[in-house]
Amino acid sequence: MPDHHNKKRFLNLPKYIGGSKAFREFITENLHYPETALEAKVEGSVIVEYDILDNGAVSNPRVLKGLGYGCDEEAIRVVNLLHFEKVKNRGVRVKLTSKTNINFRLPKVSINYSVSYTNEEDKHSIDPEQKNSNPVTYEYTIQL
């Protein structure tokens, strides 16, 4: 017979305020693509390991797998901005080590242009009232 009892945890671990979705949104909002990485067209993931103290502060971030071109420094900067919930563990101080992937993806390039056409027959018309003053406009957007 399977054991369906809730497992009790002896220690509470720090969690990001708002959950994993808020964690990803925070990283996305605060991450700035380094200029040198944009020029070199570098993209990929930086794996950062860091310690979370019992008061929710992040300490000792370190890069486990880097990309270079300023991406490693940017990933460490964003991780240092993180703040987790404080935990109370009956007087026991807890330090949690965690890892996260910081993804660097090149921004999508989009090309927008529009073309306007006027009817050639209207251009050569003798009667000015017959002229159609509304040109036909086509707009194109190409995303790469």
Image: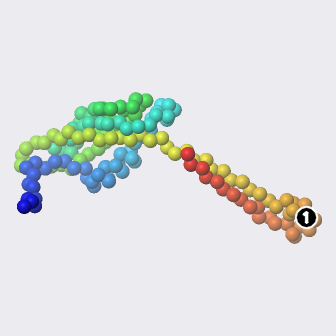
Q: Residue furthest front?
A: 1
Q: How is the image coloured?
A: rainbow
- Asked whether, in this view, residue 127 is left or right of residue 140, the answer is right
Q: Residue at x 77, y 57 (%)?
A: 117
Instruction: List the residue tagged with mark 1.
Output: 125
Q: Is residue 4 left or right of residue 133?
A: left
Q: Secondary structure at mark 1?
A: loop
Which quarter of the picture shows residue 50?
top left
Q: Is residue 5 visible?
A: no
Which percent across, then down, holds residue 46? 35, 36
Nearer to me, 73 or 10: 10
**Vertical position of residue 9 compared to residue 58: above or below:** below
Q: Residue placed farthest to the bottom in the image?
A: 129
Residue at screen point 21% across, 41% down: 52
Instruction: Return the residue nearer the eye: 112 or 78.
Output: 112
71 displayed left or right of 51? right
Identify the image quadrant of the N terminus: bottom left
Q: Is residue 17 visible?
A: yes
Q: Residue at x 76, y 61 (%)?
A: 135
| Residue at the image point whose x is 38% and y is 44% from the top | 30
Asked if 46 appears above or below 108 in the picture, the reply is above
Q: Amino acid at mark 1?
A: Ser
Quadrant position of residue 45: top left
Q: Is residue 11 left or right of residue 138?
A: left
x and y, in percent, of residue 72 in the image: 36, 32
Work out whether residue 68 or residue 6 is closer to the camera in this orientation and state it. 6
